[in-house]
Amino acid sequence: MKALVYHGPGKRAWEEKSKPIITDPADAIVRITTTTICGTDLHILKGDLPLVTDGRILGHEGIGIVDEVGPGVSNFRQGDRVLISCVTSCAKCDFCRKGMPSHCRKGGWILGYTIDGTQAEYVRIPHADSSLYAVPDDGDEEALVMLSDILPTGFECGVLNGQVKPGDTVAIVGAGPVGLAVLLTAQFYSPAAIIMIDLDDKRLAAAQLFGATTIVNSTDGKAAERVMAMTGGEGVDVAIEAVGVPATFAICQAIIGAGGHIANVGVHGKPVEFHLEKLWDRNITLTTRLVDTVTTPMLLKVVQSGKLQPKKLVTHRFALNDVMKAYDTFGNAAVESALKVILTSDAPG
Amino acid sequence: MKALVYHGPGKRAWEEKSKPIITDPADAIVRITTTTICGTDLHILKGDLPLVTDGRILGHEGIGIVDEVGPGVSNFRQGDRVLISCVTSCAKCDFCRKGMPSHCRKGGWILGYTIDGTQAEYVRIPHADSSLYAVPDDGDEEALVMLSDILPTGFECGVLNGQVKPGDTVAIVGAGPVGLAVLLTAQFYSPAAIIMIDLDDKRLAAAQLFGATTIVNSTDGKAAERVMAMTGGEGVDVAIEAVGVPATFAICQAIIGAGGHIANVGVHGKPVEFHLEKLWDRNITLTTRLVDTVTTPMLLKVVQSGKLQPKKLVTHRFALNDVMKAYDTFGNAAVESALKVILTSDAPG
Amino acid sequence: MKALVYHGPGKRAWEEKSKPIITDPADAIVRITTTTICGTDLHILKGDLPLVTDGRILGHEGIGIVDEVGPGVSNFRQGDRVLISCVTSCAKCDFCRKGMPSHCRKGGWILGYTIDGTQAEYVRIPHADSSLYAVPDDGDEEALVMLSDILPTGFECGVLNGQVKPGDTVAIVGAGPVGLAVLLTAQFYSPAAIIMIDLDDKRLAAAQLFGATTIVNSTDGKAAERVMAMTGGEGVDVAIEAVGVPATFAICQAIIGAGGHIANVGVHGKPVEFHLEKLWDRNITLTTRLVDTVTTPMLLKVVQSGKLQPKKLVTHRFALNDVMKAYDTFGNAAVESALKVILTSDAPG
Amino acid sequence: MKALVYHGPGKRAWEEKSKPIITDPADAIVRITTTTICGTDLHILKGDLPLVTDGRILGHEGIGIVDEVGPGVSNFRQGDRVLISCVTSCAKCDFCRKGMPSHCRKGGWILGYTIDGTQAEYVRIPHADSSLYAVPDDGDEEALVMLSDILPTGFECGVLNGQVKPGDTVAIVGAGPVGLAVLLTAQFYSPAAIIMIDLDDKRLAAAQLFGATTIVNSTDGKAAERVMAMTGGEGVDVAIEAVGVPATFAICQAIIGAGGHIANVGVHGKPVEFHLEKLWDRNITLTTRLVDTVTTPMLLKVVQSGKLQPKKLVTHRFALNDVMKAYDTFGNAAVESALKVILTSDAPG
């Protein structure tokens, strides 16, 4: 089969690999019909994640058709259409049982990271019963593939951890795909205002279409000042960091109101300065989280009910065969105005 | 009347001041029968809190007898024995109404800080109806004066924010009076293990008497290492910072397990380095809080039921007239093995 | 002044009464500009609430202008436009302090019940600081008067107690004004489906306009059966009772899914049969509640943000002088297709 | 092997049955070393549970040694000592994944009910990975077998659902083994008072030894009256029903305070009269629950820490071979002063 393979920093190829096989009774083999590229895949390609080794097939998002299941799989059978979760859950370890499969003793985020991933014609999914979800017959793959990672990430790490509630003033720092996923899912809870902060006017314009009530371009370094002015000096109820650098985390600290919640979504590579000398008496909550994907069943219901339209995030479409081109586009997102790129493969590979 | 007055960094005097009078319909004047000294009073004396001006009467803890009430006070009358909360609550502003009197628009922590305090024969208490609590007839003043500040602080900022639950492994960094208040109130929730970390063996010995299951002297800089070893590399469920310096906050970060809670109780004067590059995917919660004293009614019930014995914290007793000597003792806590010092004044001043 | 006065079962008059005066430092006198009639007022008129005595001015909803305040009132002054809460809160008693002013030791629901109410030119509001809310300059009185009672009732007793969450299937039994208030506010949390059940097709049609995804006319006694069929035999996540009779409560019991929540909103006059023999092992939660109006500040924000449009509930408008006619209309709601009737008085009385 | 077999109402025998075998890859066969008898087993013997058919081996509690595992079992291997949960959890269905294995699509309570149980030399445990728990090397089987059912039942259905918190006044109606399990685990949360209500003075005396602060014999029908007097007419914060008949549920309704929680633990065979006409405005919560055993890992930690000593519940000990005699004793609990009876089998059967 063909697959997108990592060959060390800066090197990727669409090349022939052996089709995966069942290696554990709980495995399923899935033929990929729709997949996409995540910002994390670009990080891997830069060499930022040393656990990813030469030869690894990338990708942790996807929808496909079950091709084969191991004898221990009881929820799915050949021919079922399934959503692949970016987090693999054994469902049996202590972390899985307390709703934290992100730290599953045998899973967690492994796809396209420490085992081969979904940017391929076929993928092996361990612990298939608890790591796949049935796709409804009328499910739109372009919409639902956003449930592999980006929507549960924005929702769980940003919205739920940020405790967004009706009437709140929410600030989201970062209008990339994950920040926009936060924006879409924050609206489940009817906040009164959502302030979107980014450096890129095009992304801010998209944010406005997706429901932001105010946009702030932070290029001039005065974003925090402006948010404080907008809120009469009180600060926001919830500040969600969706970038992953010290400067954006600093904005969150500067704008959080007394009793507020800072929810970190971004992947950070460096420590940040945390202003406990100002915040020790402000009654704030700060959270970090790797997505657990425990809300996937709920998100499926909300997408199917029409109340959430993640398809809005799709800006470009390619055949899976053209994944090298898709990477070029996604890797140049600002110029290309790219949010999410869709890769599809209709016929058996 | 006599009062303990601040006269700029390093200067305090027990001197004559005018007896306070009712200045607002919601005020009460309370004759102090029992008071104590807080670590924060020492900070003020060092000059660390610039809002405290020359001439200010110190103290934000106390029990006394109501001497006079304004026409707007309906819950108390002359002769009632009352507990004074360190936090003044108007009960009507947005923060008070959402259970956050620490940020009361007209109150918060003001006693012995921006208005005259309790280390005096009389004190004026604004918003008396919602800032005083009735003391039961059989209430022990030495025990109950700990409810002015230290017990609600340890309980709300440490135990409640840390979400201590049955079976947890809890680490408390700092075995001073507030850390010990955390230790006492953490036991309300039956954690399986409480690890107490401090530099002072005498305080650690006290902690052991008060219920710590393990003590760790952190002098050698290996506290975090040892806690990780004790927990099989998993880290603790809850880490509570009760000191207020970067080094102790660093221990909390180093020992927190995936899904764990760091609750900051200490008063910090400097920013800290926060290791988001390690913690972004660890699903942790970090909280800060100035005590709201919303749990005072509950703590009163628990003390009266005998399940909490805060009197254990009292190491020294003085007449209120000897408050200058009491400060000498408390200011030299390590040598004197002092935890809380009690000051009493039995007869009308 | 003129007021709507109760004179025993079936008797009401619009007649001259003395203008109320300040009797406690915490009182305010409010000149009514907008008020409305509640289903509970009809119950009183039937003689169902024996605590209401001859001569009582009815009404517990309203917006007006502060005419005078007692010396203990600090949040409001003459000329302020205010929303009157149906629940009076002293803010200082144990119940108020734990967020349950419905059981305030000195207040709770008293307006138009045990003290004179709002269907008058002027009303005395005890504990004004914590029982009135500032109306924004651009606030629409017809919309905001729904926040006196009906919206917080529907939201707190129905939606919050029912724990409605994104993706849920919610059933609301009763499409009267309170049931519709539940319907409007349930949408804050993006349930996937809202099933509205009533006997009246006109009300069901209104429900559909207001966001119900399915309507069920229960006249044939098969409502429960149909809801079970719609949910594949699983039952609903949340069932909200908004009528107050055994038959509607029985529907809730019959359709609740395992792990679901039954929230009672209706005012009941009789015991109900509760099927513990079927429900003991179904992991359900059942709640009752008299509205606390603790969410009024939040509801104000949501109305001002445009996310909630309670004005939809208004079907008829009268001058306050015509309140007798308004009662005729509202008392004949089915024929008149009446939901909420608005009474306004523009000029000083 | 030998097993205790049900042969229709009133008939049981200790007789030869075939040793169970692995029928599904997820199964384990466990050799029983310790088991016990539950009140529910007596109900079955009376014929109250028609799903139990002639020939069924009874028992849903036990500790044993893994004898064999299916190829899909990864958490356990032959020779492991394990605690058997009364609730079988597939870990993969929607209910299991939301923490409600009581309603597991493939499990729930089935042992000794719809499949053969634990009062035998060997038992087959389906979904072994998520239905068994490792027993620590120093674990005391007599204590830990209480974690099969009775302790998680008392804790989850009574204490957690009742939301017991520090300072509360808690009433427990029923001092049988489950009521005593509620009593033991309620103390995890340091309530100020625990009132135990029962008809049997011997059981009440045991309750007092186990931590009840007040006991009430309800034989005279005045239990509710007395509890109201004790609480100054306010009622209790939490009322826990641990019997399962209308009269005891009625006591809970009569004593619950405003804002309080009624938690039903008892197994009911008839509907009850629920006084909505009195309770609709009392802001109460009523819960039902079949135990989910999701707290078993936590309870294991608390037992191992010494903070919970369930062994106190054991009054009689028998060899497994003498199970017929054990049933006689347990079935005559009042006369025998029996709480829990322990059955042990040391050598391989």
Image: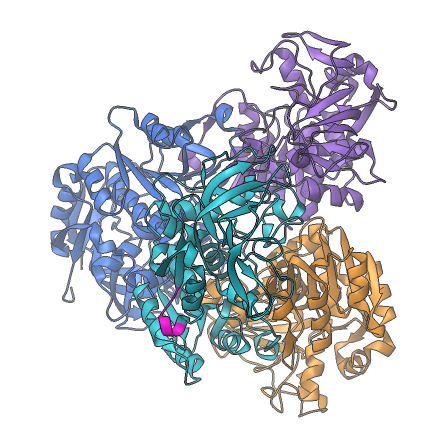
Chain colours: A purple, B blue, C orange, D cyan
- Whether D267 is drawn above or below D25: the answer is below
- Whether A170 is drawn above or below C217: the answer is above
**Left or right: C42 as drawn, with respect to B184:** right
Q: How many marks?
A: 0
B289 vs D149, nearest the viewer: D149
Which image quadrant for residue A56? top right
B319 vs C231, nearest the viewer: C231
C330 vs A159, nearest the viewer: A159
**Left or right: D146 as drawn, with respect to A262:** left
- Residue A340 in picture, x, y percent from top left: 76, 25
- Residue C86 in picture, x, y percent from top left: 61, 71
- Whether C81 is drawn above or below A245: the answer is below
- Residue D313 in picture, x, y percent from top left: 36, 60
Seen at 64% across and 40% down, the residue is D24
Q: Which residues are magenta?
A: D334-339
Q: Residue furthest front?
A: D16
- Whether C274 is drawn above or below A74: the answer is below
Which image quadrant for residue C133? bottom right
**Left or right: C316 as drawn, with respect to B342:** right
Which image quadrant for residue A208? top right
Seen at 41% across and 85% down, the residue is D220
- Residue D128 in picture, x, y percent from top left: 56, 41
